[in-house]
Amino acid sequence: MRVSVIGGSSFDDETAEVAREVGRLLGERGHTLVCGGLGGVMAAVCRGARKAEDGQHDVETIGILPTTRRADANEWVTTPIATGLGNARNPLVVLNGDAVIAIDGAAGTLSELGHALDHGRPVAGLDTHDVDLDGFRAVETPAEAVEYVESRAGDRG
């Protein structure tokens, strides 16, 4: 399954740990990760997905970059996709996953949430925008987030 993870480009230590744990759980379960490919939540979740306690997970991490250079991707992205689209790449991030996990974030994350829900992607939200729409569930832990998207991925549009 492909899971898109969205979130802010800057965060505190607690949010970084949450993002790494989400990535670790996705990596352990063999899911492909899709994200915006840069820093912040994007780098932390990719790092968690790729780096296990006992070595590395053999999972693909896809970074859909806003820039024109694949080299701009964080070091944990295995497949960088340069778009040159800036924030207009946001729909591409969420539409390339079967489900979405939102962690923290600001206006860009809210934009991605809207695109995900508008196109029928189930979304688990961890300390992010609270939206009262079908397909969105606020969750408390990384494990709950992963379990929710796994249970709902077949519901996508």
Image (spheres, rainbow, N blue to C red):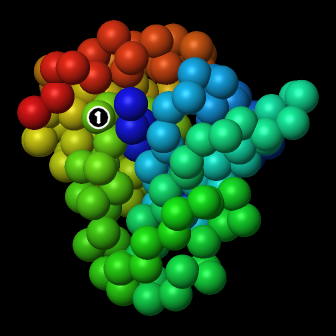
Nearer to us in this view, 90 or 47: 47
State the count of labels. 1
Name the spot of residue 16 as percent of width and height, x first. Answer: 72, 42
134 on left or right of 57? left
Residue at horizontal 26%, vertical 72%?
Answer: 88
Name the spot of residue 5 as percent of width and height, x first. Answer: 46, 42
Q: Quadrant of the C terminus?
A: top left
Nearer to us in this view, 108 or 157: 157
Q: In this rendering, does residue 48 appear at all?
A: no
Q: Is residue 50 above or below residue 31?
A: below
Identify the residue position indicated by label 1 in the image.
98
Name the spot of residue 116 as percent of width and height, x first. Answer: 23, 42
Residue at horizontal 50%, vertical 32%?
Answer: 31
Residue at horizontal 34%, vertical 56%?
Answer: 93
Pointer 1 local density, CA inside 10 Å: few below 14, some 14–19, many at least 20 = many
Secondary structure, mark 1, is loop
132 on left or right of 48? left
Q: Is residue 8 above or below residue 98?
A: below
Name the spot of residue 43 as percent of width and height, x first. Answer: 66, 55
**At label 1, which amino acid type do we have?**
Asp
Q: Quadrant of the N terminus?
A: top left
Quarter of the rendering containing residue 113: top left
